[in-house]
Image (cartoon, rainbow, N blue to C red):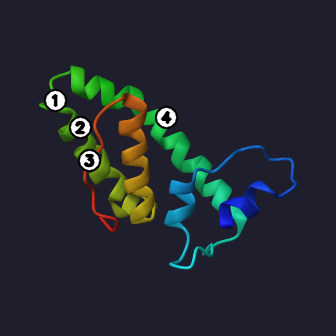
Amino acid sequence: MLLRTMQGMHDDNQILIPPSFIAIHSDARGRLGLPVAELRVRYELCEDLAQQLVEQAGQLYHGGARSEEGVLLGMHAGLASPDANLAAPEARWITLRLAELLGWRSLALPDSA
């Protein structure tokens, strides 16, 4: 229902926020825990981070990392650190998005990792 409401909004922004990202900022009843404008900013930040990490992850993998999983786990550890200023579900989302962008198998990361 929330997704349908967001898609029906009339504003100048044409970025479609994926349901997977909306879900990490929604409560059990599907209500957003932050204003839509802030959700959009958080999504753009997380998507940009995932896009920027593609090259670095590829370099780590081809530079001698043992596995795709190892690269992703290392990236997740950095994203989940307090210095990253990301919520734990955002760090998880970015890591899974990175795996998707690379065409790698997704990890089984806990929701609150």
What residue do we see at 16% from left, 29% from top?
Answer: 65
> Is 10 positioned to the left or the right of 54 in the image?
right
Earlier-in-chain disc, 4 versus 3: 4
Judged from the image, the secondary structure of the residue bearing numbered disc 3 is: loop
Q: Residues within 10 Å of mark 4 (few under 14, many from 20)?
A: some
Whether 65 is drawn above or below 8: the answer is above
Q: Are marks 2 and 1 in contact (CB under 8 Å)?
A: yes
- Look at label 2 and name its amino acid: Val
| Residue 44 % position (x, y) | 61, 47
Front-lying residue, 53 or 29: 29
N-terminal label among 1 and 4: 4
Task: Judge the density around disc 3: few (<14), some (14-19), many (≥20) Cα neighbours within 10 Å.
Answer: some
Front-most of residues 54 and 8:
8
Q: Quadrant of the N terminus?
A: bottom right
In the image, what residue type sits under mark 1? Answer: Ala
Mark 2 neighbour density, 10 Å: few (under 14) some (14–19) many (20 or more): some
- Residue that mark 4 sits on: 51
Depth check, mark 3 against mark 1: the one in front is 3
Q: What's the CA distance linking mark 4 and mark 2?
A: 15 Å
Which residue is identified by label 3?
107
Q: Earlier in the sequence, mark 3 or mark 1?
A: 1
First reached walking from the N terminus: tag 4 or tag 2: 4
- Amino acid type at circle 3 is Leu
Amino acid under disc 4: Gln
Residue 63 left/right relative to 53: left
Q: Pointer 1: what residue? A: 65
